[in-house]
Image: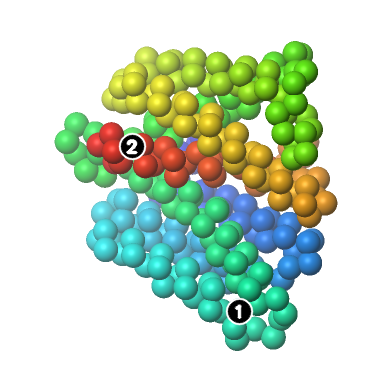
Amino acid sequence: MLGGTLIHPIVFALIFAAILFFTQFEFYNVVEKGGYKPSKWVSTVSGLLLFAISFGISVGYLKYEFAFAFIPIALFLLIFEIFSSKENTIGNSGLNLLGFAYIGAPFGLMNFIIHPSLNGQNSVFYPWILVGIFIIVWVNDSGAYLVGSAFGKHKMCPNISPKKSWEGLIGGAVSGIIMGIINALLFQEVSMTNWIAIAILTIAFGTLGDLFQSKIKRELGVKDSGNILPGHGGFLDRLDSLLFAIPAIFIWLIFSGII
Protein backbone atom coordinates (compact mmCIF):
# COMPACT_ATOMS: atom_id res chain seq x y z
CA MET A 1 0.00 0.00 0.00
CA LEU A 2 2.81 2.42 0.86
CA GLY A 3 4.74 1.60 -2.29
CA GLY A 4 1.68 1.99 -4.45
CA THR A 5 0.90 5.33 -2.85
CA LEU A 6 4.39 6.82 -3.03
CA ILE A 7 5.88 5.73 -6.36
CA HIS A 8 3.66 7.16 -9.12
CA PRO A 9 -0.03 7.91 -9.82
CA ILE A 10 -0.25 5.09 -12.37
CA VAL A 11 1.30 2.61 -9.91
CA PHE A 12 -1.18 3.82 -7.30
CA ALA A 13 -4.08 3.25 -9.68
CA LEU A 14 -2.97 -0.27 -10.61
CA ILE A 15 -2.21 -1.46 -7.08
CA PHE A 16 -5.29 0.04 -5.46
CA ALA A 17 -7.55 -1.18 -8.25
CA ALA A 18 -6.28 -4.68 -7.46
CA ILE A 19 -6.85 -4.18 -3.72
CA LEU A 20 -10.34 -2.85 -4.47
CA PHE A 21 -11.12 -5.92 -6.55
CA PHE A 22 -10.07 -8.38 -3.83
CA THR A 23 -11.77 -6.39 -1.06
CA GLN A 24 -15.10 -6.02 -2.82
CA PHE A 25 -15.06 -9.64 -4.00
CA GLU A 26 -14.41 -10.75 -0.41
CA PHE A 27 -17.44 -8.76 0.76
CA TYR A 28 -19.72 -10.56 -1.69
CA ASN A 29 -18.24 -13.94 -0.74
CA VAL A 30 -18.99 -13.17 2.92
CA VAL A 31 -22.64 -12.23 2.32
CA GLU A 32 -23.10 -15.32 0.15
CA LYS A 33 -22.46 -17.36 3.29
CA GLY A 34 -25.60 -15.77 4.73
CA GLY A 35 -27.70 -17.21 1.91
CA TYR A 36 -27.72 -14.16 -0.35
CA LYS A 37 -26.75 -14.28 -4.00
CA PRO A 38 -25.64 -10.82 -5.15
CA SER A 39 -24.19 -10.37 -8.61
CA LYS A 40 -20.64 -10.15 -7.35
CA TRP A 41 -18.85 -10.01 -10.69
CA VAL A 42 -21.08 -7.27 -12.08
CA SER A 43 -20.88 -5.29 -8.82
CA THR A 44 -17.11 -5.67 -8.48
CA VAL A 45 -16.51 -4.55 -12.06
CA SER A 46 -18.81 -1.57 -11.38
CA GLY A 47 -16.62 -0.68 -8.39
CA LEU A 48 -13.54 -0.80 -10.62
CA LEU A 49 -15.30 1.40 -13.18
CA LEU A 50 -16.05 3.98 -10.48
CA PHE A 51 -12.40 3.86 -9.38
CA ALA A 52 -11.19 4.35 -12.97
CA ILE A 53 -13.52 7.33 -13.52
CA SER A 54 -12.40 8.88 -10.22
CA PHE A 55 -8.76 8.45 -11.20
CA GLY A 56 -9.39 10.03 -14.59
CA ILE A 57 -11.07 13.06 -13.00
CA SER A 58 -8.42 13.47 -10.29
CA VAL A 59 -5.52 13.59 -12.76
CA GLY A 60 -7.36 15.77 -15.28
CA TYR A 61 -8.02 13.15 -17.96
CA LEU A 62 -11.79 13.51 -17.51
CA LYS A 63 -14.02 16.47 -16.73
CA TYR A 64 -15.66 16.69 -13.30
CA GLU A 65 -19.05 16.10 -14.92
CA PHE A 66 -18.07 12.45 -15.30
CA ALA A 67 -18.48 12.13 -11.50
CA PHE A 68 -22.23 11.91 -12.10
CA ALA A 69 -21.62 8.55 -13.77
CA PHE A 70 -22.02 6.97 -10.31
CA ILE A 71 -25.79 7.57 -10.58
CA PRO A 72 -26.48 5.35 -13.63
CA ILE A 73 -23.99 2.78 -12.30
CA ALA A 74 -25.84 2.61 -8.96
CA LEU A 75 -29.22 2.38 -10.71
CA PHE A 76 -27.89 -0.38 -12.94
CA LEU A 77 -26.84 -2.42 -9.89
CA LEU A 78 -30.36 -2.11 -8.51
CA ILE A 79 -32.11 -2.89 -11.78
CA PHE A 80 -29.80 -5.72 -12.85
CA GLU A 81 -31.37 -8.23 -10.45
CA ILE A 82 -34.79 -7.77 -12.13
CA PHE A 83 -33.47 -9.73 -15.11
CA SER A 84 -31.95 -12.44 -12.94
CA SER A 85 -33.67 -15.76 -12.24
CA LYS A 86 -32.44 -15.69 -8.64
CA GLU A 87 -34.85 -15.22 -5.73
CA ASN A 88 -34.74 -12.38 -3.16
CA THR A 89 -34.39 -9.59 -5.71
CA ILE A 90 -34.65 -6.82 -3.09
CA GLY A 91 -31.95 -8.29 -0.85
CA ASN A 92 -29.56 -9.04 -3.70
CA SER A 93 -30.07 -5.60 -5.30
CA GLY A 94 -29.42 -3.94 -1.96
CA LEU A 95 -26.22 -5.91 -1.46
CA ASN A 96 -25.04 -5.08 -4.98
CA LEU A 97 -25.39 -1.40 -4.14
CA LEU A 98 -24.02 -1.77 -0.59
CA GLY A 99 -20.74 -3.30 -1.75
CA PHE A 100 -20.43 -0.64 -4.43
CA ALA A 101 -20.96 2.22 -1.96
CA TYR A 102 -19.25 0.69 1.07
CA ILE A 103 -16.04 -0.33 -0.72
CA GLY A 104 -15.99 1.13 -4.23
CA ALA A 105 -16.78 4.72 -3.21
CA PRO A 106 -14.01 5.10 -0.55
CA PHE A 107 -11.43 3.69 -2.95
CA GLY A 108 -12.60 6.14 -5.60
CA LEU A 109 -12.28 9.05 -3.16
CA MET A 110 -8.66 8.11 -2.41
CA ASN A 111 -7.81 9.35 -5.90
CA PHE A 112 -8.81 12.88 -4.94
CA ILE A 113 -6.98 12.73 -1.60
CA ILE A 114 -3.76 11.77 -3.36
CA HIS A 115 -4.27 14.62 -5.86
CA PRO A 116 -5.10 17.61 -3.62
CA SER A 117 -4.96 21.34 -4.38
CA LEU A 118 -1.88 22.70 -2.62
CA ASN A 119 -0.41 26.21 -2.92
CA GLY A 120 -3.08 27.20 -5.43
CA GLN A 121 -2.30 24.31 -7.77
CA ASN A 122 -4.91 21.86 -8.97
CA SER A 123 -4.52 18.08 -9.00
CA VAL A 124 -0.92 17.86 -7.84
CA PHE A 125 0.39 14.42 -6.96
CA TYR A 126 0.98 14.63 -3.22
CA PRO A 127 0.86 11.17 -1.60
CA TRP A 128 1.68 12.22 1.96
CA ILE A 129 -1.87 13.01 3.08
CA LEU A 130 -3.01 9.49 2.19
CA VAL A 131 0.15 7.98 3.66
CA GLY A 132 -0.46 9.96 6.86
CA ILE A 133 -4.02 8.64 7.03
CA PHE A 134 -2.80 5.06 6.63
CA ILE A 135 -0.26 5.52 9.42
CA ILE A 136 -2.88 7.03 11.76
CA VAL A 137 -5.17 4.05 11.10
CA TRP A 138 -2.38 1.57 11.82
CA VAL A 139 -1.17 3.40 14.92
CA ASN A 140 -4.73 3.72 16.21
CA ASP A 141 -5.37 -0.01 15.69
CA SER A 142 -2.07 -0.94 17.35
CA GLY A 143 -2.60 1.39 20.30
CA ALA A 144 -6.14 0.11 20.83
CA TYR A 145 -4.95 -3.50 20.72
CA LEU A 146 -2.00 -3.02 23.07
CA VAL A 147 -3.83 -0.89 25.66
CA GLY A 148 -6.97 -2.99 25.41
CA SER A 149 -5.04 -6.22 25.89
CA ALA A 150 -3.17 -4.87 28.92
CA PHE A 151 -5.86 -2.80 30.66
CA GLY A 152 -9.19 -3.49 28.97
CA LYS A 153 -11.90 -4.22 31.53
CA HIS A 154 -14.94 -2.26 30.37
CA LYS A 155 -16.42 -3.78 27.21
CA MET A 156 -17.48 -1.29 24.56
CA CYS A 157 -19.88 -3.36 22.43
CA PRO A 158 -19.89 -6.92 23.82
CA ASN A 159 -22.73 -8.02 21.51
CA ILE A 160 -20.79 -6.99 18.42
CA SER A 161 -17.09 -7.26 19.26
CA PRO A 162 -16.47 -8.82 22.69
CA LYS A 163 -12.74 -8.03 22.73
CA LYS A 164 -13.09 -4.28 22.24
CA SER A 165 -12.92 -2.16 25.38
CA TRP A 166 -13.27 1.51 26.26
CA GLU A 167 -9.69 1.45 27.54
CA GLY A 168 -8.54 0.21 24.16
CA LEU A 169 -10.54 2.93 22.40
CA ILE A 170 -8.89 5.61 24.54
CA GLY A 171 -5.43 4.11 24.03
CA GLY A 172 -5.94 4.02 20.28
CA ALA A 173 -7.33 7.57 20.23
CA VAL A 174 -4.36 8.99 22.14
CA SER A 175 -1.93 7.13 19.87
CA GLY A 176 -3.74 8.29 16.73
CA ILE A 177 -3.84 11.96 17.78
CA ILE A 178 -0.14 11.88 18.66
CA MET A 179 0.51 10.43 15.21
CA GLY A 180 -1.57 13.24 13.70
CA ILE A 181 0.66 15.80 15.45
CA ILE A 182 3.77 13.99 14.18
CA ASN A 183 2.30 14.04 10.66
CA ALA A 184 1.86 17.81 10.96
CA LEU A 185 5.56 18.14 11.73
CA LEU A 186 6.57 15.84 8.88
CA PHE A 187 4.11 16.93 6.17
CA GLN A 188 3.81 20.66 6.73
CA GLU A 189 1.86 21.40 3.55
CA VAL A 190 -1.19 20.51 5.68
CA SER A 191 -1.70 22.51 8.88
CA MET A 192 -1.56 21.15 12.42
CA THR A 193 -5.30 21.85 12.84
CA ASN A 194 -6.15 19.82 9.77
CA TRP A 195 -3.92 16.91 10.76
CA ILE A 196 -5.49 16.74 14.24
CA ALA A 197 -8.96 16.89 12.64
CA ILE A 198 -7.95 14.10 10.24
CA ALA A 199 -6.73 12.02 13.20
CA ILE A 200 -9.97 12.54 15.13
CA LEU A 201 -12.11 11.65 12.10
CA THR A 202 -9.95 8.59 11.43
CA ILE A 203 -10.35 7.38 15.01
CA ALA A 204 -14.10 8.04 15.23
CA PHE A 205 -15.17 6.72 11.84
CA GLY A 206 -12.50 4.02 11.77
CA THR A 207 -13.93 2.59 14.98
CA LEU A 208 -17.44 2.66 13.49
CA GLY A 209 -16.15 0.93 10.35
CA ASP A 210 -14.55 -1.80 12.44
CA LEU A 211 -17.77 -2.33 14.40
CA PHE A 212 -19.84 -2.34 11.21
CA GLN A 213 -17.78 -5.11 9.68
CA SER A 214 -17.76 -7.04 12.97
CA LYS A 215 -21.56 -6.81 13.06
CA ILE A 216 -21.85 -8.19 9.52
CA LYS A 217 -19.52 -11.10 10.24
CA ARG A 218 -21.26 -11.91 13.53
CA GLU A 219 -24.71 -11.96 11.92
CA LEU A 220 -23.44 -14.19 9.11
CA GLY A 221 -21.40 -16.44 11.42
CA VAL A 222 -18.10 -15.64 9.69
CA LYS A 223 -14.82 -15.25 11.59
CA ASP A 224 -12.67 -13.64 8.86
CA SER A 225 -13.56 -12.13 5.50
CA GLY A 226 -10.81 -14.18 3.87
CA ASN A 227 -7.47 -15.88 4.42
CA ILE A 228 -5.28 -14.17 1.83
CA LEU A 229 -3.28 -12.46 4.62
CA PRO A 230 -2.14 -15.20 7.03
CA GLY A 231 -2.76 -14.21 10.64
CA HIS A 232 -4.77 -11.16 9.61
CA GLY A 233 -7.72 -12.55 7.65
CA GLY A 234 -8.68 -10.92 4.39
CA PHE A 235 -8.35 -7.50 2.79
CA LEU A 236 -11.71 -6.43 4.20
CA ASP A 237 -10.55 -7.29 7.73
CA ARG A 238 -7.53 -5.01 7.31
CA LEU A 239 -9.34 -2.14 5.57
CA ASP A 240 -12.65 -1.91 7.44
CA SER A 241 -11.54 1.13 9.47
CA LEU A 242 -10.27 2.93 6.38
CA LEU A 243 -13.50 2.41 4.43
CA PHE A 244 -15.52 4.49 6.90
CA ALA A 245 -12.77 7.03 7.60
CA ILE A 246 -11.97 8.01 3.99
CA PRO A 247 -15.39 9.56 3.11
CA ALA A 248 -15.42 11.59 6.36
CA ILE A 249 -11.87 12.84 5.77
CA PHE A 250 -12.69 13.62 2.13
CA ILE A 251 -15.56 15.89 3.20
CA TRP A 252 -13.30 17.63 5.75
CA LEU A 253 -10.59 18.20 3.12
CA ILE A 254 -13.15 19.70 0.74
CA PHE A 255 -14.41 22.20 3.33
CA SER A 256 -10.80 22.96 4.31
CA GLY A 257 -9.97 23.85 0.72
CA ILE A 258 -7.33 21.13 0.41
CA ILE A 259 -9.22 19.23 -2.29
Disc 2 + disc 1, Cβ < 8 Å: no
Report the side of 62 relative to 207 (left or right): left
Q: Residue at x 55, y 16 (%)?
A: 174
Estimate the spatial distance between the alpha carbons at disc 2 and disc 1, rounded to whole Å: 36 Å
Whole-percent x, y for residue 209 in the image: 60, 41
- The structure residue drawn at horizontal position 45% and vertical position 70%, both measured from the top left corner, is 73
User: Is disc 1 surrounded by few (<14), some (14 to 19) or many (20+) residues within 10 Å?
Assistant: many
Residue 116 vs residue 38, the one in the foreground: 38
First in residue order: circle 2 vs circle 1: 1
Q: Mark 2 highlights which residue? A: 253
Q: Is residue 213 visible?
A: yes
Residue 186 makes an appearance in the image: no
Of helix, strand and loop, which one carries label 2? Answer: helix
Expressed as whole percent of the image width and height from the top left, the position of residue 83 reads 60, 86
Instruction: Please state the total of marks drawn on the protein image.
Output: 2
Residue drawn at (63%, 73%) of the image = 90
Side (left or right) of 109 relative to 254: right
Indicate the amino acid at tag 2.
Answer: Leu
| Residue 161 as seen in the image, left or right of residue 120 | right
Question: Would you name the residue on which mark 1 appears?
Answer: 81
Residue for point 69% across, 86% down: 85
Label 1 element class: helix
**Above or below 54: residue 9:** above
Can you name the residue that lies furthest to the left here? 120
Name the quadrant of the N terminus: top right
Indicate the colouring scheme.
Answer: rainbow
- Image quadrant holding the C terminus, namely top left
